[in-house]
Image (tube, coloured by chain):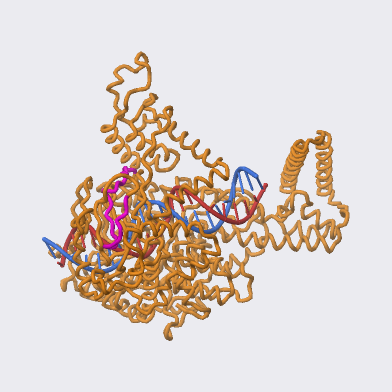
Chain colours: A orange, B red, C blue
Amino acid sequence: MSAPEPMAVVAPNLGSSASTLASRAPEVVSRAPRGRPDDSDDDEEMPLARKANGAKPNGGGGGGTAKRVVESSSEDEKPLSKKPRVSTTKRRIVDSEDEESEAGPSSSPAVPVKKEAPPTPQANGKPRSNKVVKPASDSDLSEDDKPLASKASKPASKPRSSTNANGNGNGNGVAKPKAKPKKPVSESDDLSDEESSYSDESDDKPLAKKAKPAPAPKAAPAKPRKSDSATPTAKPKPSAKAVKKLKSEPTSSEDEDEVPLAKKAAPTTKGKAKDVKKEVVKVKKEKKGQEEDEEEEKYKWWENEAMGDGSVKWTTLEHQAVLFPPPYIPLPKGIKMKYDGVPLTLPPESEEVAGFFGAMLETDHAQDAKFRENFFKDFKEILASFPPASFPLPISKQPAGWEDVKVKSLDKCDFRPMFDHFEREREKKKAMTKDEKKAVKEAKDKLEAPYLLALVDGRKEKVGNFRAEPPGLFRGRGEHPKKGTLKKRLRPEDILLNIGKDAQVPKANIPGEWKGVQHDSTVTWLAHWKENVNGNSKYVFLSAGSSWKGQSDRQKFEKARELIKHIDRIRKDYTEDLKSKVMADRQRATALYFIDKLALRAGNEKGEDEADTVGCCSLRYEHVTLEPPNRVIFDFLGKDSMRFHQEVEVDKQVFKNIKIFKDNKTRGDDIFDRLNTTLLNNHLRAQMPGLSAKVFRTYNASWTFQQQLKNTPKKGTVQEKIAAYNTANREVAILCNHQKTVSKTFADSFAKMGDKVSPSAQVPADETPIPALHARAEGEETARRVGGDESDMDEEFMERHEADLLEKATEAAKKKWEKENLKLAEEKEDTKPKSVLDERLKEIKAEFKELARERKTKKVEPRKGATEEKLLEQISKMDDRIAAARVQMEDRDKTKDVALGTSKINYIDPRLTVAWARKYEVPLEKLFSKTLREKFPWAEAEADADWVF
DNA sequence: TCCGGGACTTAGAATAATTTCC
DNA sequence: GGAAATTATTCTAAGTCCCGGA
């Protein structure tokens, strides 16, 4: 078959989050679970790969009783920050009749009707099986097909600038290809036949994109182009782009007659800034009711006819620019870092930098070699300019030649006194009274108030990141070659403002003049600067809830919806091109196949001074391994150095192609040497206006979500419906490889939950454990049947549990007695003597002794007032609680390393959520936080219960 | 055509706020 | 009521994509 068929929707309970579990199978160190009700189901649905690998059905502790889960794999024991997180998944993206039948009735129809059922991405095409990642035996595979892990250990011919601490074989630790030339797209690329005998001919001209010279040192970053003409005094010339756009734009802010009403109505320029401030303070102080009134005033841009991306974004623009952090306040006199055991008196300039490191002492960064190296280089530099004043010791006690002592080794630097000081300060802050905290908050609010809002064409809009980034140490992700570098303090001289011509130029809150002021109405940023570490541009934009961001968000999703109309044709085209005789076309088609099916990012070229991460177009030889007949294993670090590790079964032609593309290449070589993101996107734009690689991610994410939501139980409780919603969300997050660090407290809290699932733990401290309860209600037989046999309680467990309860009850009684006495003392009444407490403790002890006796003799006396009915009701409630806790536990486990937020914020059309909430009568606030509702007001206005993507 | 870089979106970590637990 | 856990928000790094100049 040639055209990819639509892919089946995956069963929600088999998402690959579980695969992640399997790949990092936590070790169960306590007893195995007994008779979990859903074990059998799990087993039945467990993908073969998992079964074959002996993965535990529930990902290692999901439903067992009182299991202690210990993250025990060597990988898991490494510091999180050093460890690229894994999305290890096996999936199948090849389509076959076989698959269709497996997929069952939930498969999307092959030919969509109108907006229906374009094929969904593979994430949902088939239950993704899980695989425990284990090193394959090298001898099983040819050199090329060896798993990356084993290859990684091979010494690279050329050392990379950075290595992967995890040694996971993502290509880190291997020479990063130095601008390997790509081949030209020319007729000479023609493949003679389908199998192709393509070879890397020497006369092929490389694609120029790769040959990037090493960047020059960025000590003095170049000014932004637009600022070249921008000075604080003279009005700069708008950028060429702006001029061009403005020329074609009839609305000119210079034309007095055409000044929009909003502007005319606005107060005079001088008074405007004050007015903005006043408004801000007012907004901050207003209570809920008033806020609701404000709501109504909000600009509903989505109701306007003329929406869309005209090049001119505003006519008038007023704002307060950026808020600089307060200047550095030197530490108290006694707080000093030490060098070689000797306290150093540092001038504020170098003390501040020392403090940056000191504050991070307990983080993984401070242990990271590259981070330390970069920090120390910059620290030494600042020390050279601002050296220690002297050692604060009497002259007689100074070490010999102390004047010449130089800070030469980071290992001899002791920042602990600084760290301890920061900790104490933090504790102090925590211990502040409510009023003190309130006062601090009020002061902060007052300071920030003027910066919160901007006036865009007379409308109030929230500003996003108005704070100038404070100085610190650069926290690059993954193996970033610059991590630890000093990020310098910004001054007004670094900041270029973009503001309305007639607006008052704000004054900075620290001394200094702005770098420049421009009035470019074709852009949406308010302030710009270049950071010193990488020379990257930073901007102040309006907040996510602003009309500018809202409009562009909506356009993004509309573009993704437009793709629905073209997707069949595009898929057909690239499927045909998989066999193209032109190498460039064949590579493009193959890349597109991956972008579409696996939701890979485009993969722009990256520089030497960045972390070595890749996307589709920049995949290299070592990132893709082939396993005949048609299995492809991806293992690479993507955006933010997140590991992408998946095994997929692909179309045979795709498999063949990759084999061809890898031919005659070696580690470090690009797989797609005739392709880059520009070529790919140019092609896509020709297929559909405005189409680019990233649109596929949006489209596939939203489409998948819509399909997944069909699994919502119509008659379920709100909780059950939300669980279905979250499952759908999770599938999308997995598809997009959105990961998060497993929280450090996860193992503990998961174990606690495990205890909860135990029936006996459901019994409050002052109540009788279930078996006894059952026994009292129905006699021993029932107790064994209901409580004893079905639960996971054995003698040893019960003993331990009772001991726990006794301890808790004793503690509670003591606290109660103390509290009562405290109160009595306050009221100047006689306190209760110790004998009262002793009496109570005696009673508690006796009760537990009785319990133990009942357990041992299995003879139980019904308690006062305990009727069979009451006790059965209690049992039933407990069973419900246990069931709910189990569901919650599984959910928690599946989501522990999957970040749901990113897809909800960026990829899932919010109208889907709104429509679903309306259809299933779930309050929207249970799905969208306050900020998300502020971000998506247009979705609430547009989507009714029947809205479809 | 190539390349640099401007402008914007997307991303996980860090931190703050809120809720739950004891 | 305070501590711990959880959730929401903020922060800023790291992507994408496209434009314009050489």
> Overall secondary structure of the magenta stretch?
loop
Q: State whether residue A131 is above or below residue A834.
A: below
Q: State whether residue A531 is above or below residue A874.
A: above
Relative depth, front residue between A352 and A207: A352
Q: Quadrant of residue A298?
A: bottom left
Reply yes or no: does residue A268 show up in magenta.
Answer: no
Q: State whether residue A96 is above or below residue A63.
A: below
Residue at figure coordinates x 31%, y 20% from the top left: A402
User: Which quadrant, please, contains the C terminus of chain A?
Assistant: bottom left
> Image check: A231 left or right of A22?
left
Of all residues, the one furthest to the top in this rendering is A396
Image x and y of residue A155, in percent: 30, 47
In this picture, which residue range is highlighted in magenta? A484-507
Residue A145 visible in the snapshot? no
Of all residues, the one furthest to the bottom in this rendering is A113
> Image check: A349 left or right of A426?
left
Residue at figure coordinates x 87%, y 57% from the top left: A865
Relative depth, front residue between A327 and A426: A327
